[in-house]
Image (cartoon, grey):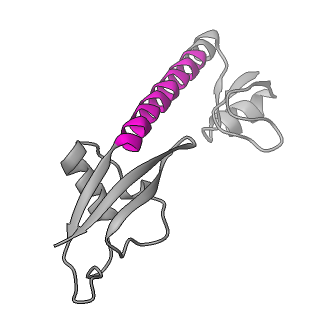
Amino acid sequence: MKVLLIKDVKSLGKAGEVKEVKDGYGKNFLIGKGFAKHATEEIIAQHKEDEKQAAADLASEIASLKEMAVKLDKAEIIITKKLGQNGHLFGAITKDEVAHALLEQHKIEIDKKHITDKVAIKTVGEHNLDLKLGHAIHATLHVDVQGE
């Protein structure tokens, strides 16, 4: 019996492969547990179509992330924060504040988890933040912190 593996199966193969197995193993274990489907021509054709669609979706997502990275590299946001007596900021600029300012000032929405800088912004002036957008695409956001 031929089966199309849906999930990786140890000692048999990886997802997407078509394998020849014994009838009982294929029906009772692989298909019964949801690891595989019976490999008919329709199932194989549908799987190939799904793979093409997934590849197209991935290419579209990467293109939009690259476009966003170009916009972010050119963008500069201004964050105004209250100053203490010694001229330092009260607290630090958080990732949430940076994401909110970017949405307000440039209409670009990013998740605060994409901001990867480990050092908190605690001083007035210009800072560059590294943004990890996914699929090995990075951008640099310029942040100008001003005191009030």
Task: Report if residue 70 lies within the magenta region.
Answer: yes
- Residue 90 figure quarter: bottom left
The answer to which image quadrant residue 69 occupies is: top left
Whether residue 27 sits left or right of residue 108 in the image: it is: right
Q: Is residue 63 magenta?
A: yes
The residue that appears at 29% across and 46% down in the rendered structure is 109
Q: Position of residue 58 (x, y in %)?
A: 51, 29
Residue, far left: 148
Give residue 47's position: percent from left, percent from top: 59, 20
Nearest the eye: 118 or 45: 118
Q: Nearer the viewer, residue 23 or 114?
A: 114
- Residue depicted at 67% across the width and 19% down the height: 39
Dominant secondary structure (helix, strand or loop) of the stretch shown in magenta: helix
Q: Position of residue 115 (x, y in %)?
A: 43, 57
Residue at position x 34%, y 49% in the image: 110
Q: Is residue 88 left or right of residue 81?
A: right
Judged from this view, the residue extending furthest toward the bottom is 85
In which quadrant of the rendered image does the C terminus lie?
Answer: bottom left
Image quarter for residue 120? bottom left
Q: How many marks?
A: 0
Q: Is 16 above or below relative to 34?
A: above
Q: Residue 145 appears at what percent x and percent y?
A: 28, 65
Compared to 108, does 83 lie above or below?
A: below
Look at the image and tell me in which quarter the N terminus lies: top right
Q: Is residue 60 left or right of residue 45?
A: left
Above/below status of 103 relative to 30: below
27 to the left or right of 117: right
Stretch in magenta: 47-74
Q: Nearer the viewer, residue 130 or 115?
A: 130
